Amino acid sequence: VGVILADYGTSWREHRRFALMTLRNFGLGKKSMEDRIHDEIQHTIKTLDKNIGKTLCPQVMFHNVASNIICQVLFGTRYEYDDEFITTVIQCVTEITKIANGPWAMLYDSLSFIQNLPLPFKKAFKDAKCSSDLVLRLLNEHKKTRVPGEPRDFLDCYLDEIEKKAEDSSFSEDKLIITAIDLLFAGTDTTSNTLLTAFLYLMNHPHIQERCQQEIDRVLEGKDRACFDDRHQMPYVQAVTHEVQRIANTVPLSVFHCTTKDTELSGYSIPRGTMIIQNMISVLNEEGQWKYPHEFNPENFLNDQGEFVKPDAFMPFSAGPRLCLGEGLARMELFLIMVTLLRKFKFIWPEDAGEPDYTPIFGITMTPKPYPMKVQHRL
């Protein structure tokens, strides 16, 4: 049972409501979260400063920044990028998300009796156990140092909830570990993969990168840094960030839904309790909904006057009761990170890298294949 992947039911509703409330209390959508994101971006800037004129692979860099932001909310800690905790978590996240929707996982789902054979999907179980052990270690540390009623982070809040000891409560330490892992994985892989998609396309569409930078320079002139509200004065950057999410289609099958009553849709009868797996390509690339459904083009989000518009078919965070918990955080991260980095750096596709391969690696999440980038300071 987890806050994101659990079946519909009382426990799921309680955990989702609790997670939303707690994330908001710790700054989701507030100025304090902007400060947290900006603090983490400074570490990314240091990494890029060290690599000026060199070729680097940005995969780990973007995973680090996304993971550390959600770690601060969940565990009250930011980790140095060579810390065992964050390096292990990122390794587990990337491996599990690729294995879980792969052919070996489908074989396991169909023939569960083969689970004891030394097949590749065993790695996913090992990674899941490793992640649980890491969070359990943090949980035990929190239990020793916390002050009841004075929560420092998500773990403390959940422990306070357990201590209320309501008879019908679904909260427990086992579910806390699963919920924390749910949020950690969701808050790391999706944002980092979207950022990787963004800079892959921006490097190979330099005219789009330059137009973003011109708008950023104009709006932020005289300001030390961007704030999330600046997006309202940046229609083109808004269009680019949304087009990145559309083209990335980071969670292609979204989170599975379920019918809560007998339903009829387009002439088909769908019984109560049927699992619904939605194909996000059906809306994010739908003919007739987009000016350029099959290419990377910010004009998909601009009207004839150059104003930002968001078509109804844009729903990368899904819809309904399972709408992404972290949509507000993800949108804020994506905007602030892209604007801050584009303001300071020029990102270049290396001359010796050949043609870019936009074909993603498929899994629970889709991510670009590893690619190189070169970075220069902007004059």
Image (cartoon, grey):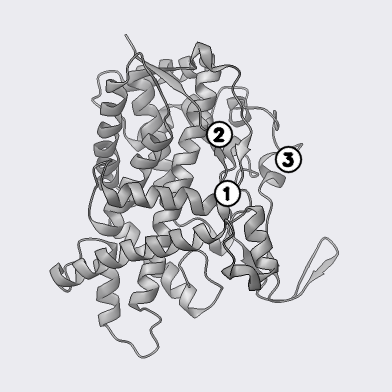
Which class describes the residues within 10 Å of circle 2: few (<14), some (14-19), or many (20+)?
some
Q: Tell me the amino acid under the disc marked 2.
A: Lys
Q: Which mark sits nearer the N-terminus, 1 or 2?
A: 1
Asked where in the image residue 346 lies, by quadrant, the reply is top left
Q: Position of residue 203 (x, y in %)?
A: 50, 20
State the mark number for residue 296.
none
Give the residue pinned by disc 2: 369
Q: Are marks 3 and 2 in contact (CB under 8 Å)?
A: no
Position of 217 compared to 121: left or right?
Answer: left
Residue 162 drawn above or below residue 35: below
Give the residue pinned by disc 1: 251
Q: Nearer the viewer, residue 235 or 202?
A: 202
Q: Position of residue 142 (x, y in %)?
A: 20, 67
At x 25% / y 27%, what residue is drawn?
46
Q: CA distance from mark 3 to mark 1?
A: 16 Å
Quadrant location of the C terminus in the rendered image: top left
Q: CA distance from mark 3 to mark 2?
A: 24 Å
At x 30% / y 18%, what residue is drawn?
221
Which class describes the residues within 10 Å of circle 3: few (<14), some (14-19), or many (20+)?
some
Give the residue pinned by disc 3: 286
Camera-nearest label, 1 or 2 = 2
Q: Tell me the amino acid under the disc marked 1.
A: Val
The answer to whether residue 235 of the structure is visible from this angle is no
> Could you say whether the residue bearing mark 1 is in a helix, strand or loop?
loop
Q: Which mark sits nearer the N-terminus, 3 or 2?
A: 3
Q: Nearer the viewer, residue 136 or 6?
A: 136
Residue at the farthest right position: 267
Position of 124 compared to 313: left or right?
Answer: left
> Could you say whether the residue bearing mark 2 is in a helix, strand or loop?
loop
Q: CA distance from mark 1 to mark 2?
A: 16 Å
Q: Are marks 3 and 1 in contact (CB under 8 Å)?
A: no
Residue 218 drawn above or below residue 289: above
